[in-house]
Amino acid sequence: MANLDWVCVPRCYEVRRNYLAGQITSDHPLKQQTVSVVDSNPLSRALEGTDPLSQFARLDEERDDPLSESRGEFDLKSKRRDRDRVDQEDNTLQWSSRRLGILNRFTTNEKLSLSTSFLVTSGSMDGGSDSIKVQTVVADKTRYRLEQLDHFDDGSMRHMMDLTQQEYIQRFEQLKQELIQSWHSDQRVKALKIGIQCAKMLADTTVLQFYPSQYVLITDILDVFGKLVYDRLRSKASGDLGASAAVLERERETARDTCQNWFYKIASIREILPRLYLEMSIFKCYEFMTSNRDEYEKQLHRLTHQLRGIADPLVSTYARSYLVRVGVSLTSSKGYIRENFSDLFVIYPQIFRFVARFNLHPEIVTATSYLQLYAPAFDYMLLCLVHKCELYTQDMLKECKHLKNNGAILMSILSSFTSEFVAANALEFIELINASDTPGISKSQLLRLLGSCVSTCAPLQEQRVTFLKVAFETINKQTDPNEYINSVETWATFVSQYFTIHEVNRLLGQLNSRMFLGNAYEKHYSQLQNILTRIMQNYRSIELLLIQPNFLPYLDLFHKDSVRVEVCKNILSYYKQNSEEYTCDAVVTNALMYIGKILNDSVNALTVEDERRQISQLVNVFIHKVNFGSDLERQLGFFVEARGTFSNLDAVYGTLVQAACKLATRNRSKSTGFVKACIAYCFITIPSIGSVQQQMDLYLLCGQLALRYLCLGQADACFEAALQLVNDLPAATVDFDGMPRSLERYLVSYLCNMLATLIVVPDSPEQGVLYFLRLLVDVVGRHEFKSDSTARVTIYLHALDMLYVQSLEKFPYHIQGVVSNDNLYGHDPKFLTEVNNMCAQVVDAILLQLKSLGMAQQVRAQAELSLELFLRIVRYADLEKESVVQLAVKLWLLANKAQSQMDENTLPQTLRSVEILYKQVVDSSPRQAQSIANLLMRMRNS
């Protein structure tokens, strides 16, 4: 339709905004509604026993029933006893919290052996000759059990050799299940024999490094056996439900007799180790024979004395640990634990006879590994000794002083005693460490434990400097770089938490000197990284750390690129979380620039996008925190320096451009020179960004900023650069989840934003009338869209909106100080002719696209866009022109043909919009109203 006679009509009605009516409400519309269902039927409540009368009646019945009263008293005592037991176990840090750590720590690759007569193979799972049939006559059952005890020998023992650790653990799990099954099958003797055979295995120290785990596995079975015995005795003592007091007393007597029988049976075991372990496993059952707590302590002392008969110090130590574990849940007395330590100190020198032997044969086990086997037992016993009781702390420390080769005990003391006690005696502990010369225990190990304690609770203020000096004199004497760095790693927390920045700087300097010797840093990257992390975590000011003379040289210890980058990322992360809101310190800024440059230089073509994004976010945080206040030139100079430093990070460039735009808005002077400098900085920076989409966004932002500050030449350059990039925009981008995402919607939104801005942009005398609009239409016409896309038509329709605004005498909005086209041309007829011609060209382009949509079978999209163009013709064009009216009618008919594929309300609403427009102009412009009325008639007739 090249002969379209388009003429824009003036707006002769007032545009008003229609606001939705508000409504006051007491509830938030997004708040979840809770519905309470109340049962109003009293009969149902009565049947359930929840009505008040039924409750009172039931309480009266229970109050008058003596059996209920007796049982209630027993239940109350049971609950109180269970609660007290749980509290005691919680207070002593249950063994169950330690067992998993022992199993994970003490492992072996050697083959293990196991001897038992109760592990059946798959072919004999049905029982075999060893299985005991369930008897129904009490006399027969008793006789059969006696026969089983008489025939208790090793003739049926099976020896399993060459078991792996996992197979060994599975066999013990099978033994545990066999014991439980035997017990529930009324085979008590068999369960006892399983317990005896398991306890005998605790004398086997063939595979030394696995002994602590072996102890855990076997004592698990003994704990199960003890619990089964205790639960059975408890069920006997509690009696049947509803039994009389006399019956209950007889039941308790029976339980007491049964308990004594169990102890007699165990006392008849010939070998000392299984006899003691079995008695300790059921030690809790003494409560059925006595209620005197002093009796518990007496029996614990008796067992302590009997444990002196175990010759092997490792076996003896773990047996004492088991005794302590049993005792702490029954009595709060610590006397028997102290006596166990007295006995241990007697046999302690014997341990080092084994150490000397292993020094000669390190292929069996090293001295260090052998002494570590004692640690779980020593630690647990000491913890139980000092838990909520400081009666024996000084006593134990004094004993340790007079003990030769006291390193193993000293390690356990440092691990188990409270940090407050260690801090109060810090100088004494450091003297002990200096004097310690224990084979298999290095001073580095002791220093690490002491460092952990004082990091939690520091010594007295007046002792700290002396203590630190003495401690680091010992640490610096260590010639082995591994021991030195391990010690410093622990003490870094203490130094950074309780001392000044000068001490921290001195520590970093000492590390630099020591670790550069012989390139020792190459083997200790993880420790060096941990030291820096602990210092940053515990020191109060990250800014003070950054300006220390030894901080940046410390980074030179990390020669490996991957580690160096990780360290720099950690530094910027801590700076992000713990720094001040802003910084203007030049030294801090230079340090952060140095760290950021390391990260920037690590980015290359092979860097994954996630890594690039992480680094960019860290650098962006640093850039946002640098603020020189009112010194805007200095701030812009920092941005210039940052642009040269972070050349590999597009996201950082984007942040710099936005920061420069924000900086321009802080200019309070009337001169626009600084604003032009900021925009020039942005204009130079944007082309270095790889993303076309980001470039377009930033050009538009800078152009709008330039327009706001009356820098029209810079604004024109930015808008033109943005439009020139449209054809470079890719058809799709990739989301974070790897899925492609079309950019058509973005392009439509972007160009609509551009058109809204171009309304107030005055034409340049060098570029002609409506230069930017012509450029936009030309760019859109050359851009490749899909054949069924509606994007191009949508953009053209908004261009038609912008052209109509250009024809108005006064634009709907302006920028203060900018002379827009309405004031520039003053509604000149020549300018209006150019606008009308441009409108006709845009309409022709829209009609071509509507035809393409019809050929692509996009009937609904074609009809909806036809109505959009139809409404713009009705509002903007002079309907006295026949060619315009004919075009409007054709568009209306085109939309009517696709009525079945459109929303049923679309056409009626469109007709109603034309009617409303008629009412708006009927008084102010009768000629235009008559034209609209004629069009309405033709629409209804069609």
Image: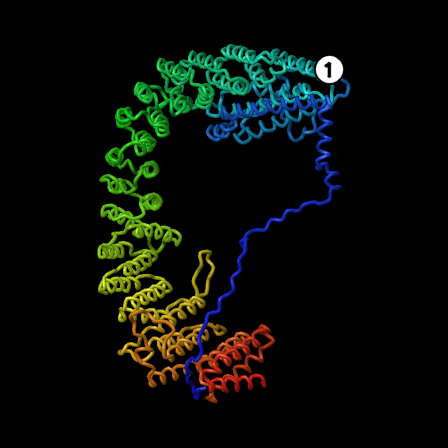
Residue 362 seen by the camera? no
Q: Nearer the viewer, residue 37 or 906?
A: 37
Quarter of the image for the C terminus: give it. bottom right
Residue 280 image position (x, y, % from top left)? 56, 17
Residue 235 image position (x, y, % from top left)? 67, 22
Residue 853 image position (x, y, % from top left)? 51, 77
In terms of image quadrants, where is residue 70? top right
Taking the image as shown, residue 211 lies to the left or right of residue 545, namely right
Which residue is depicted at the point 39% across and 78% down? 803
Q: Nearer the viewer, residue 679 or 475?
A: 679
Which residue is depicted at the point 28% across and 35% down? 520
User: What kind of element bears circle 1?
Assistant: helix
Taking the image as shown, residue 709 lies to the left or right of residue 864, namely left
Its colouring scheme is rainbow
The residue type indicated by label 1 comes to: Ala
Q: Nearer the viewer, residue 434 or 802?
A: 802
Residue 735 seen by the camera? yes
- Circle 1 is placed at which residue position? 246
In terms of image quadrants, where is residue 559? top left
